Image: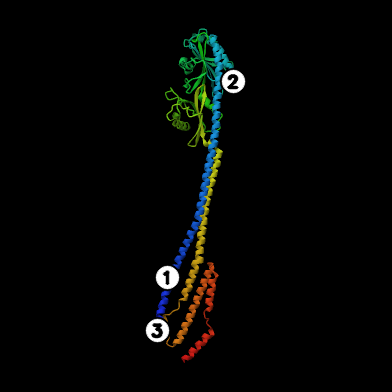
């Protein structure tokens, strides 16, 4: 059978080949459509990421700014409060030191007056001893009092606090010259017959009478003691240089005053009162409220004369006092090294000003200078910041923890929102794009399934005329048109889902209405006519 030729001069077989080629192209486009859906999904993912990321970054930036502002504000408040607390504490310590020194100065003046009277009364030790006992009965235990005469006679009265809380009193005598000596204790036969003339007496605190006497083993040369050297040429109150006390393992200085005879400068007495800075530091600690407070007092050359450190302040050779760098306590050592650097090689530690506040490794310490009788003392007091601002620091830490928790919450919330948007994008991409495209592809594939191989291979049934075959082709063509109409309807459905303009649907409906409709009766009639013509 000859090939069918259309009006354009193209054979029917060529049309069939063209249709198969189009079918192959459609299958390829179907695969490409699925790939496009994947691209659309990742585009949605990227868009969601662009929406969530700025919000996340903005939230984190706001939290960081709040965090930094809170930290700086808390730090500023902490510094202000701690500095004020330290300043008040330093003022209290300075005033207490001055108070203690003034009390001892008053006591020194009283003893100096009595010693001067005793000197004029031929070294009346009894008068001095009775006055000491009266004072200690009125005001409690007194510091060590030394009375030395220019002939070498020496008297020392000391009180010692025992472990059980009682107080023991000792009277030390050194009497190289006994002429004109008024001393009931010294008049005993044992004392008078002893060649060494160095004695220690344990005094009964109830009766003020000696309970026990024993020979002193301490070689005490008053002419070599710092308090004697300071007072023998000075009728005014003076303060001796710091020096280690004899066999006490401690150090301090003495308030001294010399008294001279009106008849001869050779006849004089020096009265001295010990001030141990260890005792002074313990007194100061009673006014402090923190557990880790450290205090140390230095003279202008940087030697420590008292501190809260419990160890010895004497050097290993016992000839000098230690400096801060030699103290094992880390707070004392570090603060001392810090101040030493500020001196820039200056050996006078009292030149940094009246009051300074410093911070080092979360430790606050104060530098202050007090002047007592033209003698400058450098007082260092300090403690960790948490000791001063424990509650405030805890509150600040709670705020920081709260901000950190909020930051983590926002990060998790942003991550959750991101995952939700991605999931919704996944479902929306599938149901609004992939599924409709798949449905359209299926309909298009059905529309192109008409088998033209019979025409191409000229394999028409021999018992049918060309009119019958063309009728079959016409019927198949109408079937294909119907399938295309269904495809267009699916496309309109997709358009409605995508919120396209309603006018597109109207155009499609008009196109569908314009298509010819098949009348079953007419087809049967035509088939009957064809059948009749065959016979």
- Evaluate whether residue 137 shows in this view: yes
Helix, strand or loop at label 3? It is loop
**Snapshot quadrant of residue 24:** bottom left
Q: Position of residue 45 (x, y in %)?
A: 48, 59
Residue with the most extreme bottom position: 535
Tag 2: Cα neighbours inside 10 Å, few (<14), some, or many (≥20)? few
Q: Position of residue 99 (x, y in %)?
A: 56, 24
Q: Are marks 1 and 2 in contact (CB under 8 Å)?
A: no
Q: CA distance from mark 3 to mark 2?
A: 143 Å
Does residue 17 sit above or below 408 in this rendering?
Answer: below
Q: Position of residue 222 (x, y in %)?
A: 47, 15
Q: To which residue does mark 3 refer?
A: 3
Residue drawn at (50%, 25%) of the image = 377
Tag 3: Cα neighbours inside 10 Å, few (<14), some, or many (≥20)? some
Q: Tag 2 or tag 3, which sits nearer the N-term?
A: 3
Q: To which residue does mark 2 refer?
A: 139
Does residue 93 sit above or below 510 in this rendering?
Answer: above
Helix, strand or loop at label 2? It is helix
Q: Position of residue 348 (x, y in %)?
A: 45, 26
Camera-near label (3 vs 2) is 3
Camera-near label (1 vs 2) is 1
Q: Tag 1 or tag 3, which sits nearer the N-term?
A: 3
Q: What is the number of callouts on the image?
A: 3
Mark number, residue 28: 1
């Amino acid at each position: 059978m000859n090939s069918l030729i259309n009006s354009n001069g193209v054979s029917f077989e060529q049309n069939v080949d063209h249709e198969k080629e189009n079918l192959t192209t459609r299958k390829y486009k179907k695969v490409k459509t699925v790939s496009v859906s994947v691209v659309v999904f990742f585009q949605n993912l990227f868009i969601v990421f662009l929406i969530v990321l700025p919000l996340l970054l903005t939230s984190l930036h706001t939290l960081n700014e709040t965090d930094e502002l809170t930290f700086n504000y808390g730090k500023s408040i902490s510094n202000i409060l701690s500095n004020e607390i330290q300043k008040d504490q330093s003022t209290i310590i300075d005033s207490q030191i001055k108070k203690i020194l003034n009390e001892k100065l008053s006591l020194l003046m009283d003893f100096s007056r009595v010693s001067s009277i005793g000197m004029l009364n031929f070294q009346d030790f009894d008068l001095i001893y009775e006055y000491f006992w009266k004072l200690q009965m009125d005001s409690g235990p007194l510091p060590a009092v030394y009375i030395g005469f220019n002939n070498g006679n020496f008297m020392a009265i000391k009180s010692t606090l025992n472990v059980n809380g009682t107080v023991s009193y000792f009277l030390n005598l050194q009497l190289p010259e006994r002429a004109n000596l008024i001393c009931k204790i010294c008049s005993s036969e044992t004392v008078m017959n002893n060649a060494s003339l160095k004695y220690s007496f344990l005094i009964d605190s109830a009766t003020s009478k000696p309970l026990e006497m024993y020979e002193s083993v301490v070689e005490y040369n008053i002419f070599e003691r710092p308090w004697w050297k300071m007072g023998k040429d000075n009728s005014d109150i003076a303060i001796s240089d710091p020096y280690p006390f004899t066999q006490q393992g401690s150090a301090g200085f003495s308030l001294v005053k010399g008294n001279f005879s009106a008849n001869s400068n050779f006849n004089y007495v020096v009265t001295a009162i010990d001030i141990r800075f260890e005792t002074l530091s313990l007194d100061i600690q009673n006014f402090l409220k923190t557990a880790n407070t450290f205090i140390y007092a230095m003279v202008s050359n940087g030697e420590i004369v008292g501190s809260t450190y419990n160890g010895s302040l004497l050097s290993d050779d016992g000839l000098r006092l230690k400096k801060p760098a030699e103290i094992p306590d880390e707070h004392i050592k570090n603060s001392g090294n810090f101040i030493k650097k500020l001196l820039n090689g200056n050996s006078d530690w009292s030149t940094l000003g009246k009051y300074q506040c410093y911070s080092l490794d979360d430790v606050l310490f104060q530098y202050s200078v007090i002047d007592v009788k033209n003698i400058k003392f450098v007082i260092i007091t300090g403690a960790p910041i948490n000791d001063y601002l424990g509650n405030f620091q805890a509150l600040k830490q709670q705020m920081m923890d709260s901000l950190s928790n909020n930051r983590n919450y926002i990060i998790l919330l942003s991550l959750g929102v991101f995952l939700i948007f991605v999931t919704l994008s996944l479902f929306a991409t599938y149901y609004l794009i992939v599924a409709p495209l798949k449905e359209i592809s299926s309909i298009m594939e059905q529309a192109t399934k008409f088998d033209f191989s019979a025409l191409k291979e000229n394999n028409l049934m021999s018992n049918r005329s060309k009119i019958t075959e063309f009728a079959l082709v016409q019927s198949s063509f109408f079937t294909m048109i119907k399938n295309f109409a269904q495809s267009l309807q699916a496309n309109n459905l997709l358009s409605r889902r995508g919120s396209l303009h309603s006018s597109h649907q109207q155009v499609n409906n008009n196109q569908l209405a314009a298509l010819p409709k098949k009348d079953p009766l007419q087809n049967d009639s035509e088939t009957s006519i064809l059948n009749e013509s065959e016979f």
